[in-house]
Image (spheres, rainbow, N blue to C red):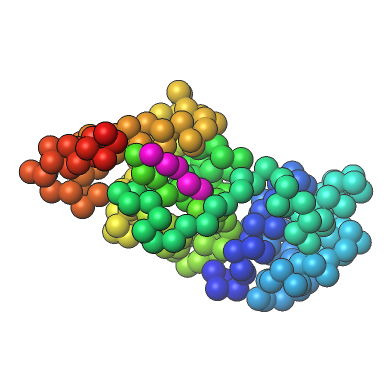
Amino acid sequence: MAQSITREAALRVALAARELGILSARELVSALVERLELPLTEAKLATVTVADLQLMLQGDEVIETDVPREQLKQAVRLLWGEGIVNSELPPVTSYAAGDMPGSIRVACASNREQLLDGHYGSCERFLVYQVSPDEVRLIAVRPTLAADHAEDRNVARAALISDCQIVYVQSIGGPATAKVVRAGVHPVKVASRENAGGEALQALAQLQRALRHPPPWLARIMGVEAGSLARFAADLVAEDA
């Protein structure tokens, strides 16, 4: 099903499900697909009315309680794509290869705003940043809903971030870790006790400092041989002089 729902549509459904607050994004997708059929696109979501949504939910017995009409209206607006640009979603900055010399690409498992508050297997989206010692740039927001309908959701999630070198998560299981590593991405757990709901930019600021004097594991990710670390650090200092 991963090829049957666009990223934008997946984002709209995830936000609408959160607005409703009584069913998962996956359940809402199933209700929408039954009425609209596959593929589930932005154009089809734009045809959904409040009455349609109410019938989809109650008629299929997805929910047992009534949802306030204002809540239904807001969920429909989100399905239409209204208000998403100005919502909690952070703005994305364009990036082209070569814009940030010496940078690496980092994904952060997130559920809200620019928070690093997601578990690998259940986060609603990955925030993708390009990170250099001098700049952090958010270049993409990638919803995970479509990946969760793939035959192997862990492989599909790994494919979403396969262009990244690192992924920050609150937690990740052993089988998922193996698939992430196989995709060429290095998973980094952020301690939940200290950083649950913390800003992704805080973790990336620490990474920026590490990029100036990278430990061996980070040097490998950056493609710097261990024996060249001293020269690599010296070059960075010379550039700042």
Q: Is residue 86 left or right of residue 152?
A: right
Q: Is residue 232 left or right of residue 17?
A: left
Residue 57 showing in the rendered view? no
Residue in the picture at 33% in, 51% down: 101
Residue situated in front as seen by the camera: 31 or 42: 42
Residue in the picture at 67% in, 42% down: 88
Q: How many numbered callouts?
A: 0
The answer to whether residue 137 is magenta is: yes
Residue in the picture at 12% in, 37% down: 230
Residue 238 showing in the rendered view? yes
Residue situated in front as seen by the camera: 52 or 197: 197
The answer to whether residue 72 is magenta is: no
In this picture, which residue range is highlighted in magenta?
A: 134-138
Q: Position of residue 63 (x, y in %)?
A: 79, 51
Give the vertical position of 115 relative to 7 (above or below): above
**For residue 163, what is the image quadrant?**
bottom left
Farthest left residue in view = 227
